[in-house]
Image (tube, grey):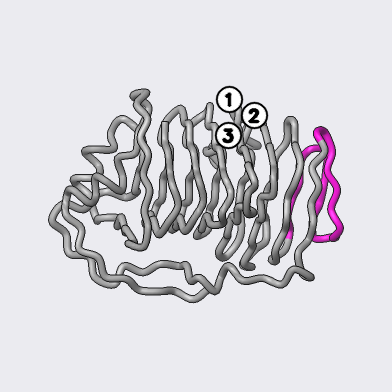
């Protein structure tokens, strides 16, 4: 996907507005943005950007206070949202089973694995399962069109391998991603994915739908690369941090509420 460059001058006040959005103290906070883009960069001393969590205020100040950030690079371009309807792969979730109209989607009980790049439209309910993206170096768009995914012992949606990933909220849809209070990892020393919505790749969340993320184990939405919010009504309830981005968090639009 084509990178874009943006120039932002961030003081402590703007950094706090972009990063301090509720947290595990139990207070609710809502952040919405219109045409103005807010860029939360990562400093040399603070390796990740956190939104929500007990240490958020201190992190916001140390990350961006008095910093002139030039040409903060984003992985996202609006052209990334374009796709051909005829190429969309439908994935139907039905409680304890799932079905797809492509061999690029592997289904084992309630585990759905997207194994190639492309655009995939998910709908329905997965009572105790997960959706995994393992697409190598390909770009993947996952359309959530009225999904309710619950995983008792892991992430609900885990993008493990991709170049860039987009989670697109279908217009007018309501979507829920919920994890459990404990995770089951495949081997000792492995502790990822560790969020209800997890991505190892650059992640963009867009679309005019609603996304509710309930994270009982740890973080709500995590990207181990860049994280862009372009649109959507997003609510996050997390045991630890609501939103975490390793390289940057860019808020271009939408409404974000973190509890």
Towards the viewer: 55 or 12? 12
For label 2, the residue is: 153
Q: Are marks 2 and 3 in contact (CB under 8 Å)?
A: no
Label 3 or label 1, whichever comes before in sequence order = 1
Q: Residue at x 73, y 55 (%)?
A: 121
Q: Residue at x 40, y 52 (%)?
A: 246
Residue receiving disc 1: 182
Report if residue 190 is visible in the image: no
Query: What's the magenta region?
Result: 95-115
Distance (Cα) linking label 2 and label 3: 16 Å
Other-residue count near label 1 (Cα within 10 Å), few / some / many at <14 / 14–19 / ≥20: few
Vertical placement of residue 229 versus 85, above or below: above
- The x and y percentages for residue 201 are 53, 58
Asked whether residue 100 is drawn in magenta, I would say yes
Q: Is residue 21 above or below residue 81?
A: above
Residue 230 seen by the camera? yes
Whole-percent x and y of residue 169?
A: 60, 52
**Mark 3 nearby-residue class (10 Å; few <14, some 14–19, many ≥20):** few
Q: Is residue 86 above or below residue 122?
A: below
Q: Which mark is residue 49?
A: none
Q: Are marks 2 and 1 in contact (CB under 8 Å)?
A: yes
Position of 191 with respect to 60 (left or right) is right
Q: CA distance from mark 3 to mark 1?
A: 15 Å
Name the element at disc 2: loop
Of discs 3 and 1, which sits in the foreground?
Answer: 1
């Amino acid at each position: 996907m084509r990178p874009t460059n943006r120039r932002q001058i961030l003081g402590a006040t703007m950094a706090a507005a972009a990063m301090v959005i509720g947290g595990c103290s139990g207070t609710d906070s809502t952040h919405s943005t219109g045409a103005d883009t807010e860029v939360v960069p990562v400093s040399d001393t603070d390796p990740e950007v956190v939104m929500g969590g007990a240490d958020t205020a201190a992190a916001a100040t140390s990350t961006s206070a008095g910093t002139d950030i030039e040409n903060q690079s984003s992985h996202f371009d609006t052209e990334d949202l374009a796709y051909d309807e005829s190429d969309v792969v439908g994935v139907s979730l039905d409680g304890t089973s799932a079905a797809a109209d492509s061999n690029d989607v592997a289904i084992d009980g309630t585990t759905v694995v997207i194994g190639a790049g492309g655009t995939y439209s998910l709908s329905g309910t997965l009572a105790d399962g997960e959706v995994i993206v393992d697409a190598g170096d390909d770009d993947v768009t996952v359309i959530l069109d009225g999904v309710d995914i619950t995983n008792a012992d892991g992430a609900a949606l885990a993008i493990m391998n991709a170049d860039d990933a987009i989670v697109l909220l279908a217009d007018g849809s309501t979507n829920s991603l919920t994890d459990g209070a404990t995770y089951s990892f495949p081997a000792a020393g492995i502790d990822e994915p560790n969020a209800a919505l997890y991505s190892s790749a650059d992640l963009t969340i867009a679309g005019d739908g609603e996304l509710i993320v309930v994270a009982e184990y740890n973080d709500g939405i995590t990207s181990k690369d860049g994280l862009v919010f372009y649109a959507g009504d997003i609510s996050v309830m997390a045991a630890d941090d609501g939103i975490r981005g390793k390289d940057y968090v860019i808020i271009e639009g939408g409404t974000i509420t973190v509890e």
